[in-house]
Image (tube, rainbow, N blue to C red):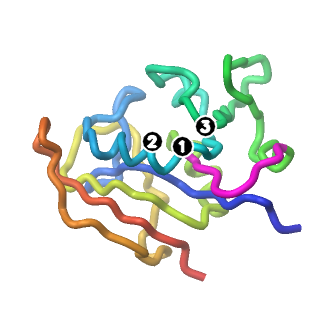
């Protein structure tokens, strides 16, 4: 049976595929946060419990927030809580559904993801969480921005939109 939705992953990684440090992003790139909001607004977003707990404002507005956790007693005000990948199938989702992290959740859904919205941070940061499983050879570039620089931090990055190769 074909799903009524498509899974997309949105993530920022550094040169070493690092995505986080101490349950936070090790960089601050205003354009990345703006792009995240523009792409995910109006769409369901799926995240792990730790990502939910790290959000400064919960739930993220104008999005159906879905939290995946093994904790059967966990509740998240303003969000739908699921306890397995299969539980996502039971929700009546349509269109593009964004997987927003963290690393465990990206890994759980990776094989099912058909689109990847990548912010490629062109520097090395002190990270404790990595996406070792991310293989760009499995993906075809749809769009790649020029190299951009964050005005405040001076961090260089580019946006790359990819689709999974058949």
Could you tell me what secondary structure mostly forms the magenta stretch?
strand
Residue 124 horizontal side relative to residue 104, left or right: left
On the image, numbered disc 3 is attached to which residue?
63
Q: Secondary structure at mark 1?
A: loop
Q: Position of residue 147 (x, y in %)?
A: 18, 62
Q: Look at mark 2 in the image and give the residue it sits on.
A: 37
Q: Percent x, y for residue 103?
A: 50, 43
Is 146 located above or below residue 44 in the figure? below
Q: CA distance from mark 3 to mark 1?
A: 6 Å
| Image label count | 3
Q: Residues within 10 Å of mark 3 (few under 14, many from 20)?
A: some
The residue shown at (77%, 45%) is 88
Q: Residues within 10 Å of mark 2 (few under 14, many from 20)?
A: some
Mark with earlier residue (3, 1): 1
Nearer to the camera, 32 or 38 = 38
Magenta highlight on residue 110:
no
Measured as percent of width and height from the top left, residue 156 is found at 16, 52
Q: CA distance from mark 2 to mark 1?
A: 6 Å
Can you give x and y, in whole percent of width and height, for residue 133 in the image? 49, 59
Check contact, mark 3 vs mark 2: CB within 8 A: no
Q: Which residue is mark 1?
A: 41
Give whichever of discs 3 and 2 has the lower sequence position: 2
Where does the C terminus fall, quadrant-wise?
bottom right
Q: Quadrant of residue 46?
A: top right
Q: Are marks 2 and 1 in contact (CB under 8 Å)?
A: yes
Q: Is residue 127 left or right of residue 71?
A: left
Look at the picture and state if 80 lies above or below 135.
above
The part of the chain drawn in magenta is 91-100
Nearer to me, 80 or 26: 80
In the image shown, does 10 or 26 lie closer to the viewer? Answer: 10
Contact flag, marks 3 and 1 (Cβ < 8 Å): yes
On screen, residue 94 versus residue 55, left or right, reads right
């Amino acid at each position: 049976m074909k799903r009524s939705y498509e899974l997309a992953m949105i993530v920022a990684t550094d040169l070493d595929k690092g995505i986080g440090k101490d349950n936070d992003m090790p960089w601050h790139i205003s354009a990345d946060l703006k792009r995240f909001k523009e792409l995910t607004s109006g769409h369901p977003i799926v995240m792990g419990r730790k990502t939910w707990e790290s959000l400064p404002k919960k739930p993220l507005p104008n999005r159906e927030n879905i939290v995946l956790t093994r904790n059967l007693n966990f509740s998240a005000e303003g969000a739908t809580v699921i306890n397995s990948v299969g539980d996502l199938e039971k929700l009546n989702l349509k269109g593009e559904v964004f997987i927003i992290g963290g690393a465990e959740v990206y890994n759980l859904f990776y094989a099912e993801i058909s689109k990847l919205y990548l912010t490629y941070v062109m520097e090395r940061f002190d990270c404790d969480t990595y996406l070792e499983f991310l293989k760009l050879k499995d993906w075809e570039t749809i769009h790649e921005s020029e190299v951009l620089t964050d005005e405040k931090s001076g961090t260089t990055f580019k946006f790359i939109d990819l689709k999974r190769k058949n």
